[in-house]
Amino acid sequence: MQSAALIARRKIGNGIFVAFCWLTAAIALASLAAILFSLVKEGAGGMTWHIFTMDTPASGSEGGLRNAIVGSIMMCVMAMFIAVIVGVLAGTWLAEYAGDSAYGKIVRFVNDVLLSAPSILIGLAISYLLVTHVFHHFSGVAGSVALAVLAAPVVIRTTEDVLKLQPPALREAGVALGSPLASTIRRILWRSAKTGILTGALLAFARISGETAPLLFTALNNQNFSWDMTKPMANLPSVIFQGGLSAFDDLRKLAWAGAMIIAFAVLAINIIARTLARENRQS
Amino acid sequence: MTLTIDRSETAPQAGADKAKPRGGALDPFFEALCFACATLMLATLCWVLVSLLIGGWPAFHKFGVKFLFITSWNPVTEVYGAAGPVVGTLITSFMALVISLPIAFGVAVFLVEFCPAVLRRPIGTAVELLAGIPSIVYGMWGLFVLAPWFALHVQIPLLTMAKPGSLLEKLTSGIPNGANILTASIILAIMILPFTAAVLRDLMLTVPPQVRESAYGLGSSNMEVITKVSLPYIKRSAIGAVMLGLGRALGETMAVTFIIGNSHAFPKNLFDSGSTIASTIANEFSEATTEMHTSALILLGLVLFLITFAVLAMARALLGRPKVV
């Protein structure tokens, strides 16, 4: 009798547990679906050709996001340029030269801290360096450097991981051919790790393209179209931030459209990176 | 008889031992370049710390350690205290963790144990992709969808229910506009949910199938296998994963700035508007005009740096190196 009761109790407990897991999964997916749904619903309304052909307006007049989109792309591309060069070289040092040295361990730890440090603090520090002391005004360059500091740790980490996965035989083959270590790394290891490094760079790109906080005090914003990176530069996240908090319906609509563009761009980059990573793993 | 070996055949030719591979001269330069880039990262972190220290010094000099306990933040009288933002940061992050952890745990268990095999990949990927959506998008959603809904369906009914002078009235007083600490915590919870769920799932997949199968073989139910076998197996790393989620919540800026109401007063209850360290900096830094205001904001940043650094260092010690992809 007692064991039957025990079994019944365990069955009921387990039933509740299983139901809980299904329920939480449903809650999580529902809330995330709700976000994507409002994004498409509110964003699609604002999606017109003006978005890509006109600059950010004052409230009441017609306008688009051209200057912000171009500004964002320029700053992200420049940031990635810096981050990939520094990141791949630093990752190479960690994987090929550092070994188990104490300094290598310190750099790895520092990189992990930077990887998850609050982006707003990176923005503060770069702003203090470039805006307060070097240029004395907000600029697109300062924004790019702040974004580069956020992207580089991701590139370093993936480069190191991918290089460590390359078989030692590749290095031995290079040495056996009489090639110096630097050439072995550049000509053989980087080539064979190409896809992995590219994946890391894409993930970093996805990470910085939606970053807002560090741009608020480095690039600031710009109502006009500009190619000049030494001046304040328009960028999508700042326009979304200002538009979203403004009291005007048309600016809010613009902000939704911008949010939708950013969200789907980031999703697309992430999907490409993942597909690349999967193909790499299979081959 | 002595054995003599004629070495002349195998002896290296003159100068051959000095032969170096072509391009070998580049080797040290390349290594130095890589080393310099690695050092640049160390320099960056040091610079973050140094700039926060230098920038925050005037405020620290004026207010001292009391900075942490002063509850007013007043640019007019130039009295700045971190108590409101610090408490706001800790409360929102902690509540976000309390809300999201059970759900993240449920999602992770669901994906590993109960999810139909066909759906496992798509749902798993969806969860991972959502972890990458920029936080400003969550902020927009919080401000325009969650906050009005929350005000209409939670705050106002509670307010009308509360008798004057009752505890409920004290807890729910405040402007019912949905921009408060509780909704900020909910948004944070939704934001860190995909991240925590994805890490927990990866950890659960590291439990060897033999261990789980032997538990099932002994007649354990699903719940017993997970709570008594899987969880103890990943306990340490799981705590690390949770800390990593906490680290994200602490430093999160945009999602919170949209919805917390941005009041610097010490929050009286969960339905009160408040501020976090990050939201205060985001709102005021580019508009601060006096040196003391800027300095106080940077000092706030230093406090945030120290809090997150402690949490991240602990997470890393427990989890080992977190994975990127």
Image (tube, coloured by chain):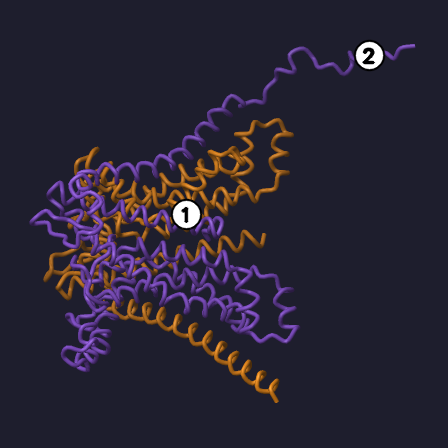
Chain colours: A orange, B purple
The subunit letter for the residue under badge 1 reads: B
Q: Nearer the viewer, residue A217 or B239?
A: B239
Q: Where is residue A240 in the image (x, y as percent from the top left)?
A: 22, 58
Q: Residue furthest right?
A: B1
Q: Can residue A186 be seen in this view?
A: no
Q: Where is residue B14 in the image (x, y as percent from the top left)?
A: 67, 10
Query: Which element type, helix, strand or loop, lies under badge 1?
Result: helix
Graded by Cα atoms within 10 Å as few (under 14), some (14 to 19) or many (20 or more), the crowding at tag 1 reads some
Q: Can residue B31 be seen in this view?
A: yes
Residue at position x 39%, y 47% in the image: A115
- Amino acid type assigned to the residue bearing label 1 in the image: Ala
Dot in front, 1 or 2: 1
Q: Where is residue A237 in the image (x, y as percent from the top left)?
A: 25, 54
Q: Residue furthest left?
A: B76
The residue beneath circle 1 is: B313
**Which mark is drawn over residue B83?**
none
The subunit letter for the residue under badge 2 reads: B
Q: Where is residue A213 in the image (x, y as percent from the top left)?
A: 26, 51
Task: Give the CA separation, mark 1 to mark 2.
Answer: 64 Å
Numbered circles on residues, count: 2
Query: Which element type, helix, strand or loop, lies under badge 2?
Result: loop
Same-subunit check for callouts 1 and 2: yes
Give the quadrant of residue A31. bottom left
